[in-house]
Image (cartoon, rainbow, N blue to C red):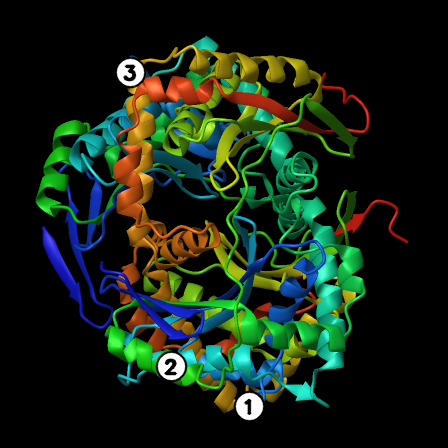
């Protein structure tokens, strides 16, 4: 077990790779009442095409998320209930690139950890139980279909990407999930839920050695094979489509604009790009940027305006959006401001101010157990140490931000997804 | 964690929670005022206008620049409903001094800035600025209208409006569009002055700093306040159910129907009602989740919530519109089961341990603690989470059954699609 101390940010982390390949991170929080465990597999909504036993397999959209729902079924009943009886608050989520199962508890932590590791590593589905889930997930999909933010995001991804599975919704569609069978779910579990493809992150007042011993005891001894995946890499950096629009039951128009960016290398470069991307957003359109003030004072945007930078397997993009009566005008203003900053350079005082603010924001993020656990897990999967962020942050310069803007935040790279109220004049 | 409560000025209280485990200071300053249809819009608009600028930092850009220099301190206005009070003010966070690279002290300047935002706004001719008022009115009206965008929240809000007609609890914390439209800088300024002088003001701090230092910082930041006599917070009257169930159905172009139910409760054994609500639909192991969702696959979510101060329960679910009656029947069926005491031992212990977790974990979040204490104040209580939990843990199955027997369907709200969709 390796112990790492981070005095600048007041954190201590224990790290270990077990003989079965599981990577373990224990982040100490001795004064909190609750502890949490995140058991995460590097398998998400984008992992639709992969190689199993030398054969390329295509799986239906939404399968990783469907599998997440079904993992809670056990031979004896349901793990949700087992954990709840034992005082834990369990939950799970599927994103583009990972699936995470987790619980919070204020007592019986180690027993709960055992239950978590057991139910995630032992699949149990039947034809009936898989069919039964369709109704539930179909309602989940219907629910998000009525959500304007989801609509604008999904449609934007469809504009930006041609081949990347980033264009496919994590939950799939009511139609695509009909093709999912118990057999495919078992195959996907075999491929992606072995210890070598997973990370266990524990945050709280716990003993790291004991966590390691439990993981060793409960999980399989064997580490599976690495799985080659197809993310449709190498597509052009120009979006497939420039614009998409839809009418919905909303009170005013809203938009989400995206700028396709060059994806990072793995390792520290990944972490560096993610911090740089966040800074670019703050400088370009953050609450204290000149652009934000100007648009806000002109009445073109309100508090809903904002955006971020996101890295996915083989893809990266910057997005910005909000409610406005002039979506295209706001989008053009963002692109024009990026061009201005890239050409004229960023004001030095402003840059130094934003640097300070970004640093504070990263420290603030350390209050959230979920954010710590997920960031640490992603760090493991993409081969960097999340807690190195203060040092990595220091390597970023004003010229890096300007260069990022010049290369990525341009008209050619951008697309816009618009949502208008029904019968909007 | 020992809570220290100090009165700084007439009806201005500071609640200080020393906690070394957070990386941040968390501050809040909230006026607690009666929630009324006539004034809700004013309370919602005011902090948004104040956030546009202070005398020292008269516009957004100067204000946000000041926040950036405090290592990205975040100050934002907040408006919420707790009990039958409207709470409006500011919440602020900044990193703890221990993590500032130069060891700079942030608590004092942050508190000062919060004090300025509340007490020292940018004015013209003695009034809050017209341009800021006009632009924030537009934003607030847009915000009120945008409630419709999230259908789940919208349906929940509509249920409360229907169920609590004539009660302050049915009023939205954001106020109503028409009333907001009629606000002028002079009306807003009068309201503002009145609040400063005679509104109950609750100040809050959670973080590493010594309580004496915190008190000094707040005293200094609010020393300019001139206080008059302040009306006490009135107790929150319980909701009384109608003689007949009221059913409201509305149509919109949506793919999923939203079913929201309100139940009145006669029992005043509130801890028992709380446990009953957890068994019914409070967790992902509750009867609603296990039956409406897991067994019948009718929905993705079906959950209940206990509105403790008003003593009623609401249920919310998203379903195919054609399954309306089926869902309604199943929810009623599950309530009946609880009224007959039909549950397994594990269901009861899971409900209890979920409450135990929830009350213990409040101490792991500075913002949850703030919301807890503000909620206590707004409902005229002054209890600690541990005290409440201790009482909850004494609830027996018999008490739950007794309480459940007094739960009656009160209002049904159903938001459904424009036409039956083809589910082929």
Q: Nearer the viewer, residue A54 or A374?
A: A374
Q: Do the residues marked 2 and 3 share a common chain?
A: yes
Secondary structure of residue under mark 2: helix
Q: Do the residues marked 2 and 1 share a common chain?
A: yes
Q: Is residue A151 left or right of residue A67?
A: right
Lower sequence index among marks 2 and 1:
1
Where residue B8 sits, quadrant-wise, is bottom left
Q: Is residue A344 left or right of residue A12?
A: right
Secondary structure of residue under mark 3: helix
Characterize the local packing of mark 3: few (<14), some (14-19) or many (20 or more) Cα atoms within 10 angstroms: few
Residue position for label 2: B219
Residue position for label 3: B345
What percent of the width, then of the height, locates residue A233?
Answer: 52, 49
Name the residue at 54% across, 89% down. A347
Quarter holding the C terminus of chain A is bottom right
State which chain disc 2 sits on.
B
Characterize the local packing of mark 1: few (<14), some (14-19) or many (20 or more) Cα atoms within 10 angstroms: some
What percent of the width, then of the height, locates residue B264?
Answer: 56, 28
Q: Nearer the viewer, residue A354 or B181?
A: B181
Looking at the image, is mark 2 or mark 3 nearer the viewer? 2
Residue position for label 1: B56
Lower sequence index among marks 2 and 3:
2
* Residues tagged 2 and 3 counted as in contact (Cβ below 8 A): no
């Amino acid at each position: 077990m390796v112990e790492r101390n981070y005095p600048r940010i007041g954190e201590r982390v224990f790290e270990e790779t077990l003989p079965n390949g599981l990577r373990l991170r224990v982040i100490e929080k001795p004064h909190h009442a609750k502890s949490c465990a995140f058991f995460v597999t590097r398998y998400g909504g984008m992992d639709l095409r992969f190689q199993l036993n030398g054969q390329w397999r295509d799986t239906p959209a939404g399968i990783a998320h469907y599998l997440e729902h079904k993992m809670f079924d056990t031979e004896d009943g349901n793990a949700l209930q087992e954990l709840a009886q034992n005082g834990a608050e369990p939950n799970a989520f599927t994103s583009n690139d990972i699936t995470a199962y987790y619980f919070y508890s204020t007592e019986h932590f180690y027993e709960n950890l055992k239950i978590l590791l057991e139910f995630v590593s032992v699949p149990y589905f039947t034809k009936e139980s898989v069919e039964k889930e369709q109704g539930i997930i179909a309602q989940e999909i219907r629910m998000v279909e009525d959500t304007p933010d989801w609509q604008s995001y999904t449609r934007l991804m469809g504009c930006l990407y041609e081949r990347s599975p980033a264009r496919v919704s994590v939950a799939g569609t009511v139609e695509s999930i009909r093709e999912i069978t118990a057999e495919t779910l078992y195959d996907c579990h075999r491929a992606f839920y072995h210890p070598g493809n997973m990370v266990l992150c524990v945050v709280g007042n716990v003993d790291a050695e004991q966590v390691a011993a439990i993981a060793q005891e409960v999980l399989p001894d064997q580490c599976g094979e690495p799985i080659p995946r197809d993310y449709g890499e190498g597509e052009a950096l120009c979006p497939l489509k420039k614009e998409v629009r839809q009418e919905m039951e909303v009170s005013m128009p809203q938009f989400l604009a995206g700028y396709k960016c060059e994806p990072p290398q793995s390792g520290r470069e990944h972490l560096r790009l993610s911090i740089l991307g966040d800074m670019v957003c703050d400088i370009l359109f953050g609450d204290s940027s000149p652009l934000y003030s100007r648009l806000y004072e002109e009445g073109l945007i309100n508090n809903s305006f904002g955006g971020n930078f996101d890295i996915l397997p083989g893809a990266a993009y910057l997005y910005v959006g909000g409610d406005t009566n002039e979506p295209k005008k706001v989008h053009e203003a963002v692109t024009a401001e990026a061009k201005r900053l890239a050409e004229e350079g960023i004001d030095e005082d402003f840059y130094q101010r934003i640097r300070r603010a970004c640093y504070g924001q990263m420290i603030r993020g350390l209050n959230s157990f979920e954010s710590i656990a997920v960031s640490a897990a992603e760090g493991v999967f993409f081969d960097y140490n999340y807690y190195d962020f203060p040092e990595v942050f220091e390597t970023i310069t004003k010229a890096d931000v300007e260069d990022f803007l010049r290369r990525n935040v341009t008209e050619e790279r951008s697309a816009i997804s618009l949502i208008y109220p029904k019968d909007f004049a | 964690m020992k809570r220290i409560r100090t009165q700084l000025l007439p009806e201005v209280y500071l609640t200080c929670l020393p906690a070394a485990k957070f990386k941040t200071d968390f501050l809040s300053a909230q006026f607690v005022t009666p929630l009324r249809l006539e004034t809700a819009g004013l309370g919602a608009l005011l902090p948004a206008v104040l956030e546009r600028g202070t005398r020292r930092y008269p516009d957004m850009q100067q204000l946000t620049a000041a926040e950036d220099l405090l290592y990205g301190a975040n100050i934002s206005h907040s408006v919420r409903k707790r009990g039958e009070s409207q709470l409006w003010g500011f919440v602020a966070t900044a990193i703890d001094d221990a993590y500032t690279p130069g060891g700079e002290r942030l608590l004092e300047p942050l508190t000062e800035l919060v004090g300025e935002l509340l007490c020292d706004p940018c004015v013209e001719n003695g009034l809050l600025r017209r341009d800021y008022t006009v632009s924030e009115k537009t934003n607030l009206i847009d915000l009120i209208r945008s409630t419709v965008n999230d259908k789940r929240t919208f349906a929940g809000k509509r249920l409360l409006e229907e169920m609590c007609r004539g009660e302050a609890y049915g009023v939205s914390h954001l106020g109503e569009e028409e009333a907001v439209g009629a606000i002028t800088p002079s009306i807003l300024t009068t309201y503002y002055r009145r609040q400063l002088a005679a509104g109950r003001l609750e100040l809050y701090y959670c973080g590493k700093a010594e309580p004496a230092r915190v008190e000094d910082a707040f005293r200094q930041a609010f020393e300019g306040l001139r206080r008059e006599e302040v009306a006490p917070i009135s107790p929150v009257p319980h909701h009384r159910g109608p003689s007949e169930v009221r059913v409201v159905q509305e149509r919109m172009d949506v793919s999923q129907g939203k079913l929201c139910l309100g139940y009145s409760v006669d029992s005043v054994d509130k801890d028992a009602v709380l446990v009953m609500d957890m068994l019914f639909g409070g967790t992902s192991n509750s009867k609603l989740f296990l039956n409406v969702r897991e067994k019948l696959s009718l929905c993705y979510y079906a959950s209940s919530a206990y509105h403790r101060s008003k003593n009623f329960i609401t249920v919310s679910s998203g379903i195919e519109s054609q399954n309306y009656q089926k869902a309604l029947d199943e929810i009623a069926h599950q309530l009946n089961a609880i009224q007959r005491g039909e549950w397994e031992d594990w269901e009861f212990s899971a409900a209890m341990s979920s409450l135990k977790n929830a009350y213990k974990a409040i101490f792991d979040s500075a913002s949850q603690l703030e919301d807890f204490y503000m909620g206590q104040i707004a409902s005229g209580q002054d209890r600690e989470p541990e005290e409440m939990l201790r009482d909850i843990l004494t609830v027996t199955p018999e008490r739950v059954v007794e309480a459940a027997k007094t739960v009656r369907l009160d209002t049904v709200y159903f938001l459904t699609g424009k036409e039956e969709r083809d589910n082929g």
